[in-house]
Image: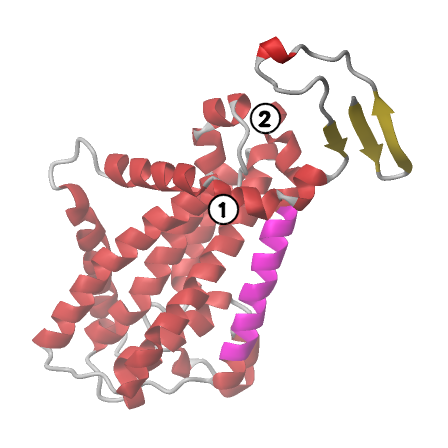
Amino acid sequence: MVTVSSENAPPATIPLEPRSEQEGLGSADYDLIIEAGRAERRYWHDLWQYRELFAVLAWRDVSVRYKQTVIGAAWALIRPFLTMVVFTVIFGKLAKLPSDGAAPYALMVFAGMLPWTFFSTALSEASMSLIGNANLISKVYFPRLIVPMAAVIVSFVDFLIGFAILVGLMVWYAFVPGWQVLLLPLFTIVAFGASFGVGVWITALNVKYRDFRYVIPFIVQLGLYVSPVGFSSNIVPEEWRLLYSLNPMVGVIDGFRWCLLGGESRLYWPGFCLSLLIAVFFLWLGIRQFRRTEKSFADLI
C-alpha cells in the first residue's frame, strides 16, 4: 500500500497489489510513503549528500579555468599585480595620497586588492554559473546551490594563489605583520560570506533577468573605484565613514589591512560592524532568493 499525506489533509493509504516473494522482495507487500514537504526539509541534508558532486564541479572549473592559455594559472598572479602597480603610480605617486602609517603604498594597495579580486571574481563567475551548466540543471536533480558554491571556491583558489604575491611583497619590503595576522582567517571567512551572499543573489536574478550579464561588469568596474582598494579609507571624512561602510567590502578590506599591516592601519570598528551586518544580510537575502526561485531554474534556463 502507498501512504500519501499533504500539509492540510491526513495521510491517505492506497493499497497496492501484493508482489510475489519470487521477485526477491522477501515480503508479500510493502509501504511507500510520499509525504508533502519532505524534500524541502531535507534540502540541507541533500546538500551534504551531494558533496562529491560539489567537489567534481569545483575541480572541473579549476582545471579548465586557464586551459589552453600560454601562462596558465600565472594569470591569477599577473592581474592583481599589474592593477597594484597602476594604482600605486596613480594614487601614490601622482595623486600623492597617503598610505596607512609607514606601510609602503604598494603593500597597502595589494592588501586591499586581494579581497576585492576575490569578491569581484566570485561575483562574475557565480552569476553565470547556472547558465553555464544549463544542460546539467535541466536533466538531473541535485541542490542547485552547489553550482554557485563551486564557482566561488574556484575564485577562492585564485585568492590563495594571489596571497603568494603578498608574502613576496612583505619579504621585499622587509615588513613583518603584528599579532593581528592571526585573525586573518576570520576576515577571510567574512570575505567569503560577502562574496557568496551577493553572488548567489545575483545568480538567482540573472537566470530570470538576463540584463544582469551586462550590469555585473559595470558593478565590478565601479566597485573597484568606490571601494578603498587603491587608497586608504582613512581619507574619507569622519562624518561620512559610517555611510561609506554600507559597502560591505569596505569593512572586509579594512580588516585585511589591519591584519596584515598591524598598527600601521587603523580599523574603524563601527564601520566594520556595519559592513559585517550588510554582508550577513546579503548572505541571508541571497540564499532566500535562490531557494525561492530554484524550482523554476530548469524552465527558465
Determine which residue is flagged by label 2: 298
Q: Is residue 288 magenta?
A: yes
Give the answer, above or below, for where 112 lies relative to 260: above
Query: Which mark is first along the chain, 2 or 1?
Result: 1
Horizontal and vertical percent position of residue 217: 43, 45
Identified at 82% across, 18% down, the residue is 15
Secondary-structure class at tag 1: helix
Q: What main secondary structure does the magenta stretch of the protein show?
A: helix
What percent of the width, then of the height, locates residue 92?
Answer: 23, 74
Q: Residues within 10 Å of mark 2 (few under 14, many from 20)?
A: some
Give the vertical position of 79 relative to 127 (above or below): below
Q: Residue visible at 77% across and 11% down?
A: 17
Q: Is residue 263 above or below residue 227?
A: below
CA gap, disc 1 and disc 2: 22 Å
Circle 1: residue type: Trp
- Range drawn in magenta: 272-289
Q: Secondary structure at mark 2?
A: helix
Q: Is residue 262 left or right of residue 273?
A: left
Q: Give coordinates of residue 209: x percent, y percent.
A: 60, 35
